[in-house]
Image (cartoon, rainbow, N blue to C red):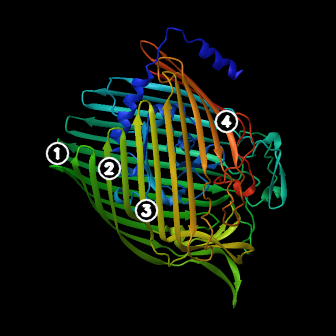
Amino acid sequence: MIFNIIASVLLATAPGDTTVVMEQVDVASQRRRDFQMRTSQSSIQVTSDYLKQNFGGSLMQTLEHLPGVKAMSIGSGQSKPTIRGLGFNRLAVAEDGVKHEGQQWGDDHGLEIDQFAVDRAEIIKGPAALLYGSDAIGGVLNLYTNHVPTRPFAGSVQLFGRTNNEQLGISAKVEGRSGRWFYRANATLIDYADYQVPADSIQYYSYWIRLKDRRLRNTAGAERDGSITVGYSGYNFHTDLRVSDSYSKSGFFANAHGLEVRLSKIDYDRSRRDVDLPYQWVNHLKVMSHTTWRNELTDLELSLAYQNNRREEHSEPVSHGYMPMPEGTLERRFNKHTATAMFSLRQAIGSHELRVGVSGEYQHNRRGGWGFIIPDFETVAAGIYVMDRLTLRKGLVLNAGLRYDYARTRIHSYEDWYKTPAEGGFVYMSRSTDFSRHFNSLTWSAGINYATRGWVMKANVGKSFRVPIPKELGANGVNYHIFRYEKGNTKLDPEQSYQVDASVSWDGKGLHVQVEPYLNYFPNYIYLSPTSQYEEGLQLYGYTQARVLRWGVEVQVSYAISRRWQAELQGEYLWARQQSGAKKGYTLPFSTPWSGDASLKYLYGKGVGDYVRLNCHVVGAQREIVPPEKPTPGYMTLNLSAGKQFAFSWAKLNIALNIDNLLNRRYYDHTSFYRLIDVPEPGRNLSAVVGLEF
């Protein structure tokens, strides 16, 4: 039926219709060239059209087909970003220039950001600590939601859904401008059921788990997002205030949370849309103020933000080790407050563009519940940087910068709420003691941009750093999601990274070629390493440091075959080795295998939204592992997408269809949260978005 619909759309195109694709390609090439000359680092610009045409179940699933960008899937409705194999606290996510601060150390929840409120995105690949400080050691995902309306009133409504997990959702936006004042408001509602996999059963620790209707029980969830922006935009002066709130609730696969489901009285197969224990909910409140003043030579910018991230995990009470049966279902609670301030000055002086900035941040996190994993903590951080961009001549730009950062982390003591036998009797075991650590670092970066005719060549070399997070310093407890005992290391040093990036691209006559090699060396990479010891009957994993060498390359080729046909090839490869420590000679945990994409796109109408695209996604086998990881076989999937745009005098109607895993192949994603328990990726999945812009 789907193929019949697409064929009908193709045949509906009148013979007299024309599409001037080559002119669009020329314009796109110039825009791409201008964007690439802005920075010497490897970067990707993502437009609103791309976000609409590649809709996924989460923001990162929408972006994961970009070179070097991957989504670490967590069930069916959430995912975490990785860039060149680095994620969590090694990747900064910034919304309108402000770092998003949640419990990003956790591998079981995604971003608390409404993807339908994002106007455009920018991905910086490689160290970006010069502007963003700690946590940007692997790259930055910049999300922009601050588009200024130009009309008195405008808006959009989008209805969307996915077949695999029966997702249904609606997102609405209204905006307007009166004189120099403007406003924007967004609201998104999403609800989804347990997702399907192409398997009748899975095996976990030699225990076979049968699946009802091939669904991963208790992976349903819901999301509620809202935001409002008010602002003033004059000729030289701009200021706005944005308040956003994101709430999500999702279940954990019932058979993966310590296998206690075998003793549970919950009927997990009663409904595929309910959320039973174990589950989590996350609420993220963000208040941001952004003010700029500029003229031809000077820019002044001030950003202030407050964020409150609350997260709870609930599960059936379970007695473990010497812990008696607890009361209630609250296993873990985290409540994090973050205040951020940033000020920057840009001054043009002849052929120089000088930028100076200062930033400060305060974090306050408190825990709760009967399970312990990380202690309470406060963190204070401050940084100052200076950058110079020197234009020697048209098409030749040099840039260099220095940054100094200082951070202090205070960890609070914690004792179990139950007694454990020890010498001399029973005691309340200490999981964490009071201590403080001070960190400082000097980072730098230097690069060159060179453009001539159709060529753009870039190179960048730099040093970045990352402050050890409280979990790495003070963890001391059972992680039930992976069923292991994790222990921090109070003596960890700040993680450092030295990286060389290069990029060579060429545009001409409808052909675009881009090659991006990179080399990354960590003198003291921080990672969680399995040991031969056991705590409370579980294998002990401890945080340690080692020298690590990483290198890789990304290649992208696109060609406009004719006015209607476009082809694209892209691929990426990453190699990593630990150069010291107990795991010397091993790669890094969850290292991404090589992958490649081949796409063919047909434009059948006059608008950019009239297209049909077939994509072949190939991923190599990953045999380079760190136990207890398992080797993952390679796979290939076919994906089909199509779109149609209808223009009216008062509105535009956009329809986009995406079919992932068209052949319903059974395969495994090596970086998936559920890979360790042999859960395959979702089967065939049809996504549809119908949007009305007025």
Whole-number angstrom distance, CA of label 2 to CA of label 1? 22 Å
Q: Is residue 175 visible?
A: yes
Q: Secondary structure at mark 1?
A: loop
Q: Are marks 1 and 3 in contact (CB under 8 Å)?
A: no
Q: Amino acid at mark 2?
A: Asn
Q: Which mark is residue 297?
A: 1
Q: Amino acid at mark 3?
A: Gln
Q: Residue at x 75, y 74 (%)?
A: 537
Q: Residue at x 31, y 48 (%)?
A: 450
Q: For the residues carrying marks 4 and 1, which lies nearer the camera in this image? A: 4
Q: Which mark is residue 638?
A: 4
Quarter where residue 512 is shown: top left
On the rendered structure, is 330 left or right of 491? Answer: right
Whole-number angstrom distance, CA of label 2 to CA of label 4? 37 Å
- Which corner quadrant holds the C terminus? top left
Q: Is residue 100 visible?
A: no
Q: Are marks 4 and 3 in contact (CB under 8 Å)?
A: no
Q: Are marks 2 and 4 in contact (CB under 8 Å)?
A: no
Q: Secondary structure at mark 2?
A: strand
Which residue is disc 2 drawn over? 449
